[in-house]
Image: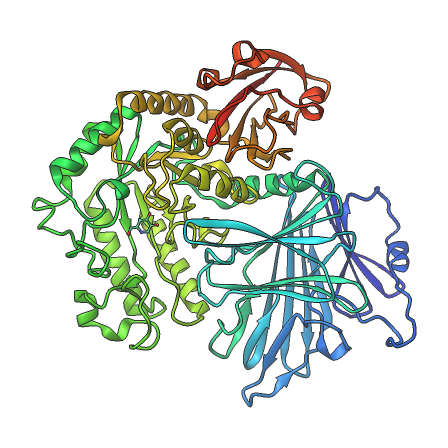
Amino acid sequence: MSTVRDIRCWTLQDQRQSLILAAHGTDLAEIIYWGPRLPDGTDLEMLVAAARMDVTGGMLDAVPPLSICPEARRSFPGQPGLSLTNSAGEALLPRFTFERAEEDDQTLTLLYHDAKNGLRYRARFELALATGMIRATASLTSEQPVSVSWLSAPVFPAPQNSHEMIDFHGRWIGEFQTSRTPWSAGARLRDNPTGRTGHEHFPGLIVPCTGATNSQGSAYAFHYGWSGGHKMLAEELPDGRRQIQWGHATGSRRSPGTQFETAPLYAVFSDQGINGCAIAFQRHLRDKILQPPAPARPRPVHYNCWEAVYFDHDHATLCDIASRAAALGAERFVLDDGWFGRRDDDTTSLGDWTIDRRKYPDGLMPLINHVHAEGMTFGIWFEPEMINPDSDLFRTHPDWVLGDPDQVLGRQQMVLNIALPEVQAYLYERISAVLADHPIDYVKWDHNRVLPEPDSAQAEAIYVLFDRLRADFPTVEFESCSSGGGRIDFGILSRTHRVWLSDSNDPLERLRIQHEAALFLPMVVTGSHVGPRKCHTSGRETDIRLRAWVAAQRHMGFEMDPRELTEEEADVLRQVTRWWKGNRHWTERADILRLDSDDPAVIAELQRAVDGSRFVAFAGLSAASAQILPRPLRLTGLEPGTLYEISLLNRDDAPGLSRGSPLLKTETARLSGQYLMHQGITLPWTFPQSIWVIEGTRL
Ligand code: DGJ
């Protein structure tokens, strides 16, 4: 901290950025600068003075501060950072006074109090030097119980040289769709009452500065790491300043209390385009948040039996499928829904976590032994937070349900109130019994309906249950699934190790979903499976090459019935799987860079090894192009002055209608990074709904 003439200043910085906060007297701090690193020895007093704004007619005589928790009682002209009432239901309008700061190179904690209302406020910022990610949290403590309807994580300003913001919506089998909203007076509000992260509201925001693309310009990005429903507010104040607030969803903190804390807000600045933000999120999640049971173990190729058998479990069939999956290259067999209670369809048995002896008369061990004999490990599906009215659990404990008894069901199911200690104890006992009795190294943890009412206690309780299970079963990996990608966030991913990105195994849908999700998710956590020839969720038939390569972009798996594969399809799948296994030692740690495609029909990315020595680029032609020949594919993230050897890995896939002789159809090319990034690669013509795979090595 530096103090000059009653101004306090704090700096957090790494090689690429400076974050500078300042406060007058004992006021709450404001972020007065966040952007490219300022020169050493920058005069902070001058920065504060230089940022002082004018006032004119119709304004107050001073501009109210846009602090880390804007206070309503200071005439702040926008959403305050905190809204609360006392036990009499009266609104409290706190005014905080500086108490002290704790700081070191990477963290800054600011503490304030409001003696009149008996409140304490704390904001904490932590800058991860290795990833450039800022993690910010806020907490409030009260001497008397209060009801908090809004507590924002520390408030960040947004740049005024930005025309639009990008946030996310989506749906089942259509996750990670982007919305671009022009900045204008007033607020854009995303308030997610569903009680889970949600397909509809991935908690992310990107604010590109004017002119920024994937590969160039400046951009800011945010992610609220919370699984229980969140609220985002991006507001332009009447004076033109802009603020970003994130916190728990409205109404989800249901009981009065004395301690409140936000989830971590992850914030990043990039001067290397939107990809700079994406790389920071990918690396930070992979290297700082995930806690894999065996970090050095390569990600195994999955086989998941859901779309092959659904609820129809028959020992001989499952063994046959498992043997075929292993022959294709699978390394882990996941037994999905249908193994417990009397679960012959999705109307029954959630909550009854005992093996169905009609389907498994000798238990699960005969199947597990077969899977092991085929050289695979064994994983299993649970949906612990749910209950079917048609279940023994419901018949015994109807009072364990969250919400009204006459609530509308979702997939025939209700949610258990897992904040109740007896429900936690029951679930822990049931799940741990299955894990303790069987050699299981993986759990797919599903969550297939929204909560009947907003309730943050539910997310807190699920974190507790995960933490307990992980402590007692440290070798088990967990996957977060929620009708596909309904619960993906850095909160759940600090307890799980993979996400089921979407229930869509349609490679065309997946190509897009994976492309957008890469803004936040690295390859290692992003499950992607080769589905059936005719996709079960789109009805579309696609070629095995497209299906296999799209799955090979991420954590690869298979989910079709392998008995449907022709010999040729099986060959292609084996080859692509072999490629994936042969490269995962570097692709698992690679940065995924989204390419700025000049053809809207092409969705393309480049995965670059951490040391920059090699890359693989995928260019998926999602539909027919408007022009007859492919536009050059401009790469990114290469060294301009270095030569690269480029080859088209799947050049044999060129169709007969490609009649010319572009170099890459038959040969490798040696081209500079400058050429590849400015001019781009000339690819052969190909069919819509196909994909080119380009490998590059630094010479
Ligand atoms: C929804 C999941 O997203 C699917 O992958 C599958 O596990 C089913 N649930 C099982 O009911």
| Residue 422, placed above or below residue 632 | below
Q: Is residue 540 left or right of residue 560?
A: right
The x, y position of residue 189, in whole percent, is: 61, 65
| Residue 262, placed above or below residue 35 | below
Query: Foreground: 60 or 660?
Result: 660
The x, y position of residue 124, in whole percent, is: 64, 59
Q: Residue at x 26, y 75 (%)?
A: 399
| Residue 516, placed above or below residue 107 | above
Q: Residue at x 86, y 66 (%)?
A: 6
Number of numbered labels in the structure image = 0
Q: Is residue 313 left or right of residue 584?
A: left
Q: Is residue 50 left or right of residue 390?
A: right
Considering every residue shown, the one lying at the far bottom of the view is 88
Q: How is the image coloured?
A: rainbow
Query: Foreground: 144 or 545?
Result: 545
The x, y position of residue 675, in whole percent, is: 70, 20
The x, y position of residue 658, in whole percent, is: 51, 17
Which quarter of the rendering shows the N terminus?
bottom right
Q: Residue at x 56, y 76 (%)?
A: 148
Quadrant of residue 325 within the rendered picture: top left
Would residue 259 be visible to someone looking at this image? yes
Quadrant of residue 668 within the rendered picture: top right
Query: Foreground: 689 or 262?
Result: 689
Which quarter of the rendering shows the C terminus?
top right
Q: Residue at x 24, y 47 (%)?
A: 435
Quadrant of residue 518 within the rendered picture: top right
Would residue 129 be visible to someone looking at this image? no
Query: Foreground: 440 or 541?
Result: 541
Q: Is residue 626 left or right of residue 7?
A: left
